[in-house]
Image: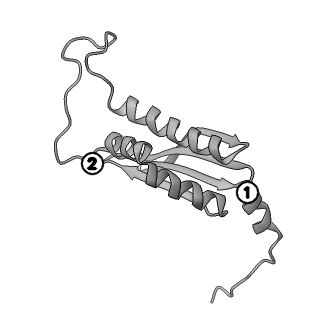
Amino acid sequence: MHDEFLCHVTAYGVCGGMWVGVPLGTYRAPTLALAMWWLRDRASWIAERLDPDPGAPYFPPNSMAPVAGTSPDVPVVLRTWCGDLAQQESAAEELAAGHLLRLVTGDETTEYELLAESVDALRMQRTLPLRSVPAA
């Protein structure tokens, strides 16, 4: 059983003609349950910022417009992942087994990555002998 997990959320997009990543948060979770909670919380946080309630009092009237129906719906993907108990259980099992958990979704301009990995698995990888392969 892996006891500690590193969790990261990053947004990727093109800036100045280059693919860049912008960290949106990092958390060192002391338990599997807290790692899963943090990932769900960040997914919900992103979804709320991408798809806020247009009736909220802090938005002036007519300040928001719907996106085209053909656009990928990142907030729906993230909210669906958060609410799917089977996916949550599967993700927790992968993390508990020491595997990397990576959820990626995106639209025309930005890719969002939620990532979690076991600290113990990372330590174990560092102790393995280095495998080198000739370049040519």
Q: Residue at x 62, y 64 (%)?
A: 99
Question: Identity of the amino acid at label 1?
Answer: His
Name the residue tied to disc 1. Answer: 2
Label 2 secondary element? loop
Q: Which mark identifies residue 106?
A: none
Q: Are marks 2 and 1 in contact (CB under 8 Å)?
A: no
Name the residue tied to disc 2. Answer: 72
Q: Nearer the viewer, residue 31 or 109?
A: 31
Q: Nearer the viewer, residue 102 or 98?
A: 98
Question: Identity of the amino acid at label 2?
Answer: Pro
Label 1 secondary element? loop
Picture coordinates of residue 18 (x, y %)?
Answer: 45, 51
Q: Nearer the viewer, residue 29 or 70?
A: 29
Mark 2, other Cα within 10 Å: few <14 / some 14–19 / many ≥20: some
User: Does residue 16 appear in this view?
Assistant: no
In the rendered picture of this protein, how many numbered marks are placed on residues?
A: 2
Q: Is residue 54 left or right of residue 79?
A: left
67 is higher (above) or lower (below) than 6: above
Picture coordinates of residue 80 (x, y %)?
Answer: 36, 45
75 is higher (above) or lower (below) than 97: above
What kind of colouring is applied to the model shown?
one colour
User: Does residue 41 appear in this view?
Assistant: yes
